[in-house]
Image (cartoon, grey):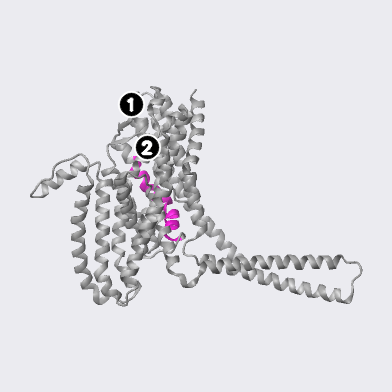
Amino acid sequence: MEIKDIHQLEKQAYKKSHAELARIGMALFFLVAVLGYSFATSGGVTNNLFLAIATVFGAYMAMNIGANDVANNVGPAVGSKALTMGGAIVIAMIFEAAGAIIAGGEVVSTIKKGIIDINGFGQNSELFIWAMMAALLAAALWLNMATFAKAPVSTTHSIVGGVMGAGIAAAGFDIVDWGTMAAIASSWVISPVIGGIIAAAFLFAIKKTIIFRDDKISASLKWVPVYVSIMAWAFITYLVLKGLKQVWPQFLTLLNDWLFFSFEITQKPTFLNAALFGLVVAVAVFFLLKRSLKKRRATLKNDRASVNILFTVPLIFAAALLSFAHGANDVANAIGPLAAIHDAVMTGGINAKAGIPFWVMAVGAFGIALGLALYGPRLIRTVGGEITELDQMRAFSIAIAAAITVIIASQLGLPVSSTHIAIGGVFGVGFLREWLDQSSHLRDEIAQEKQEIQDEKRLLSALRSELNSLMDKKQKSVADYQRITDLYRTIDEEKGTLKKAKKTLKKEKKSLYVKRDVVKKIITAWLITVPAAAVISACLFYMIKGIME
């Protein structure tokens, strides 16, 4: 039997190693293809070697964005079983790439969030190129490490840290806009707190209006269209503001061709524009869903499972729309510094904004999709199930919280991270579940069990001390021998009691709705993302500078 077990383990290890080699091979093939294309299209340009290497770094960064950040969009849907892992990856790949290519924009800010003053480089374009290359590679390496550790972190914060570290190494601390950095640091608290509160509020509302009612089906027919309509409004508003801002004039022109009235063509959508579009879609969704649910009433049971089913399709749409908007916005994290390098190589100058060719945008788009396909499942499982157990209602609350939080933050000018919002939403629904389930008194039981373990340890220590004293005694009486025998027996019994108590404590900790160890790991990763990426970037800059000089 043991030989068979060993053989099975060998087969599993062999299979796993081959799968890992295949993933690495596909990633390397993509990077080599990107390198070759860059050389082929910039052969006669001075410093084309820098551009080619930077393109590889940008592709590597894009893959790491796909592997880490996209999990926040589809993780809750997978964890709730609204989508399979394969289905989620296919949807996310398509919509991430579509968002990046369609709405990623032809012009991006070369210095993410304006955290450094490009005037600090003077007109030394080579120094600037080295700094951007170091920033790009440092952010990608940090994301790679975080993905390996199964810690979802902000890709925006990673590139911010990279740019800051390289900027400081190149031109000193004065180059950094510390006010902007303080605002970014505040998002470590603002994003998860707002996301958690909104997600918990929606879940509580769903429970109060549907789950806690005796007639769950009638309550569902009344309230599910309301909640899904709110989600539709939030997502359309979010999509217009964040996903279509780069193609807004073209979008309005297309609409004007279809409609019997015309919209005024503007360069970017206002909140009122976006909200009105969202409202129109929300009203349509409300009436369509209400009619659909009435037809399905006979097939639904008066239980929680049937209510969960009603949120499945909205969750799939949420995952797709979040992926589209994420691709449109976060592709700039991969190609922003690359755009800066491309512009500096082509023009020989340093500009705050730069136009980028379609192929550079495509590198970012397909890199995100490939990274998601190859390494995304690791983080999707963490977000979807390893923090807290999710069903469709909880995942729906997280998805709607993500959209509403970004809308609120953008209107108030608050710096937020989509990663932190989504994970904050997961925390929020998990802690709400703990708060609602007060009958178990789980935390009190854990505290009591810990105290009992400490008491057992102290008792064992005292018994062992007494035993050692008696054993060291030269002249032992019959009573001493009897006591030694009793002590051995008592110590064995106490060891068994202690072992049982530790096992009980471990079981009770697993019953917590939010896994504290995972929470600590994620928060730690958030806090060190900017400084870690900055340190790596500074080291890489000095290394590049040393090689080139």
Would residue 296 appear left or right of 118 to someone viewing this image? left
Identity, as a three-letter code, of the amino acid under mark 2: Lys
Q: Which residue is mark 1?
A: 346
Would residue 99 appear left or right of 147 to someone viewing this image? left
**Dominant secondary structure, magenta:** helix
Would residue 308 appear left or right of 68 to someone viewing this image? left
Identity, as a three-letter code, of the amino acid under mark 1: Met
What is the C-alpha distance between the residues marked 1 and 2?
20 Å
Q: Is residue 452 magenta?
A: no
Q: Is residue 87 above or below residue 41?
A: below
Q: Nearer the viewer, residue 492 or 355?
A: 492
- Dot 1 or dot 2, earlier in sequence: 2
Helix, strand or loop at disc 1? helix
Q: Which residue is mark 2?
A: 112
Q: Is residue 378 magenta?
A: yes
Find residue 448 and report its horizontal and vertical position in percent. 58, 68
Helix, strand or loop at disc 2? helix
Q: Nearer the viewer, residue 440 or 59?
A: 440
Range of residues picked out in magenta: 363-385
